[in-house]
Amino acid sequence: MSVNIAILGGGAIGAILGAHLAQAGHSVIILARGQRAEHIAAQGLRICGLVDLSIPVEVLRDPARLHRTDILIVATKTPGTADALANLGHVDIGVAFSIQNGPLKNELLSAVFGAQRVLGALADTSGEMLADGSILFTRNVNILLGELPTGQSARANDVAATIDSSGVRATAVPNILSLEWSKFVCWVGMFAVSVITRSVTWRFLTDPDAALVLARITREMGHLADALGIELTDNAVLPAASLCQGTEQSAVERLVAAGRVIESRAPEHRMSSLQDVTAGRPLEVHETLGYALSKAAEHGVSMPLLDGFYRVIAAAERIRVA
């Protein structure tokens, strides 16, 4: 089987992309399994919220049947990604990218397909799977794509244009690694705080104590980015550079201001980590928070606050599944 676009994962973002790209006329398959595969096969992809869209899309349960795809988009949760990609090692890939959380995704893709076929990416785009299997599309800001670690290319421009013309906003950028880490240094704290507070995003961002904890974790992560030689920017999801470089109080004020914006634009937005908790799905704690801590240990960076949150959340996960 050969297709234009193969999407690994039929969850919220994978479904949003798959539905839009299929509607735009591209040949798309969703690589999925279990109940989700059965649901898509029977009812197609149904998107509500920012758009009202329902379209049939082919589901592929057996990865061995896929032989060639121009674009591979990885949109699964990070647990189990290495095994899922290993099952696609035989596929002739034009270019691959992942919209998963954290930098580990690029390393996993490069290990299977070679670094020359991998683009960096981050999604400032949100959705949530509802009880009936449809997807609530809540934010359509941007999917950023680019060559790793830096640089512009025709292929990145083409992929971004393909996605953008389908209705999901996307842009090619020359500094994708900086942008990925700028999102990541903020995201790890938001992951932790959302799981602990069980709150919609704007509420914990505007709470002074939660915002203070988030600011401190973000600033710990900023030290890690500095040790890795990665320049942070304010042009990702949150103003990472300013959060790390200014005073602690100014960081809290910026987070509260960002929360007010989300309150006005997407008041029901919930972090994917919180969605996983409420749905009983495995948390990405080891592949994201754990990844950050392992990099910190390699480079002698102390992150005691993040380490504490990581251990508590990991313990809660073990207890929950025991």
Image (cartoon, helix red, strand yellow):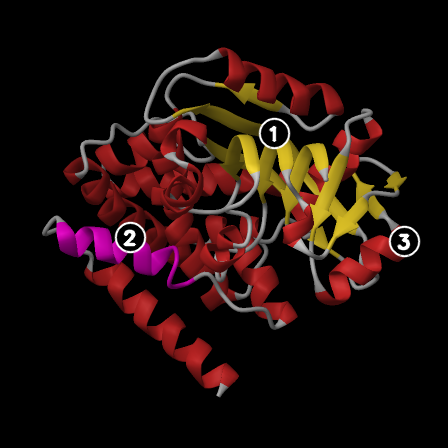
Q: Amino acid at mark 3?
A: Gln
Residue density around tag 1, few if under 14, some if 14–19, many if 20 or more, within 10 Å: some
Residue density around tag 2, few if under 14, some if 14–19, many if 20 or more, within 10 Å: many
Q: Amino acid at mark 2?
A: Ala
Residue 131: give x, y in percent of width and height: 79, 64
Q: Earlier in the sequence, mark 3 or mark 2?
A: 3
Q: Which mark is drawn over residue 292?
A: 2
Q: Is residue 133 among what the camera can see?
A: yes
Viewer-proximal residue, 24 or 283? 24
Residue 116: give x, y in percent of width and height: 39, 27
Cα gap from disc 1 to disc 3, whole angstroms: 27 Å
- Depth check, mark 1 against mark 3: the one in front is 3
- Depth check, mark 3 against mark 2: the one in front is 3
In the picture of the structure, the residue carrying the numbered disc 1 is: 141
- At mark 1, the secondary structure is strand
Where does the magenta region start and end? 285-298
- At mark 3, the secondary structure is helix
Q: Earlier in the sequence, mark 1 or mark 3?
A: 3
Q: Which residue is rendered at x = 51% and y = 83% of the image?
A: 321
CB under 8 Å between callouts 1 and 2? no
- Residue 228 falls in image quadrant: top left
Q: Amino acid at mark 1?
A: Val
In this rendering, would 79 be left or right of 52? Answer: left
Q: Which residue is rendered at x = 67% and y = 20% of the image?
A: 162
Q: Which residue is rendered at x = 49% and y = 61% of the image?
A: 80
Count every numbered label the image shows and give the total: 3
Say which quadrant the N terminus sits in.
top right
Viewer-proximal residue, 170 or 41? 41
In the picture of the structure, the residue carrying the numbered disc 3 is: 43
- Depth check, mark 1 against mark 2: the one in front is 2
Residue 168: give x, y in percent of width and height: 69, 28
Q: In the image as oriented, which residue stretches furthest toward the bottom? A: 322
